[in-house]
Amino acid sequence: MRRPTPDLGPALAAARDGDPHGFAQLWRALQPALLRYLRVVAGDHAEDAASETWLQVIRDLDRFRGDLGAFRGWLFRIARHRALDEHRRRHATPAEDADRTSPDAATVAIEGEGTDWALQVIATLPSDQAEAVMLRIVAGLDVATTAQILGKRPGAVRVATMHGLRRLATHPQVCDRTAREAAAEV
């Protein structure tokens, strides 16, 4: 379940004006969802893609125009591009050190075993469905913003999300876990 997002409008305005405290507030509020999304689309390179995403945000924030919803869309669009860059980089050169990235302590504390398991199951979906589910359900973006990020029509996003959710509902690991939890409650 998604936690309510604090009013980040003032933080966005402050960050746009160069205030590091405003930027820190944006980062603290949005980084967990960004990392969850990137873990599905960039795998082990999620931390690298997230770092590159925030670096680009820092570079370009003074030129950004829009409200918080537009900022979230812009942030996830940048993240998607950085994830694609990481994917290209991985396939262009051999893996130098496959386990060089490890989650930081804050991430481990925020995300428990259940979240990691859910992200692993979502990652088994076809990529269009996984991205649609992550952006719509996990990151909480609207259909129009998700469609812009993915370069798809809103109807295609709705269909991909629906197919992904249906596939998750019948996924063997989900069914098994649901049955075990139901049996434990009895």
Image (cartoon, grey):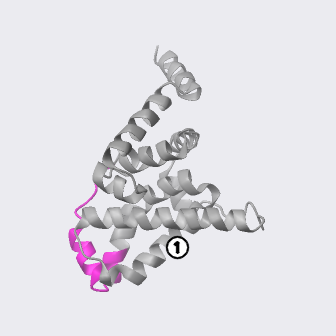
100 vs 37, nearest the viewer: 37
Give the answer, above or below, for where 43 lies relative to 114.
Answer: below
Tell me residue 54's x, y (percent).
45, 73
Q: Residue at x 30, y 67 (%)?
A: 71
Magenta segment includes 59: no
Classify residue 10 as left or right of residue 84: left
Give the answer, above or below, for where 62 lies relative to 102.
Answer: below
Residue hosting label 1: 52
Q: Is residue 47 visible?
A: yes
114 vs 93, nearest the viewer: 93
Classify residue 148 as left or right of residue 92: left
Q: Is residue 108 visible?
A: no
Give the answer, above or below, for where 55 lies relative to 179.
Answer: below
Tell me residue 61's x, y (percent).
34, 80
Q: Secondary structure at mark 1?
A: helix
Q: Are there few (<14), some (14-19), or many (20+) residues within 10 Å of tag 1?
A: some
Which quadrant of the figure has residue 137?
Answer: top left
The residue at the far top in this view is 186
Classify residue 8 as left or right of residue 135: left
Q: Residue at x 35, y 76 (%)?
A: 23
Which quadrant of the figure has residue 24?
Answer: bottom left
Total marks shown come to 1
Range drawn in magenta: 3-23
Magenta segment includes 19: yes
Give the answer, above or below, for where 44 lies relative to 23.
Answer: above
Tell me residue 37's x, y (percent).
48, 54
Classify residue 38 as left or right of residue 162: right
Tell me residue 1's x, y (percent).
36, 42
Three-letter code, disc 1: Glu
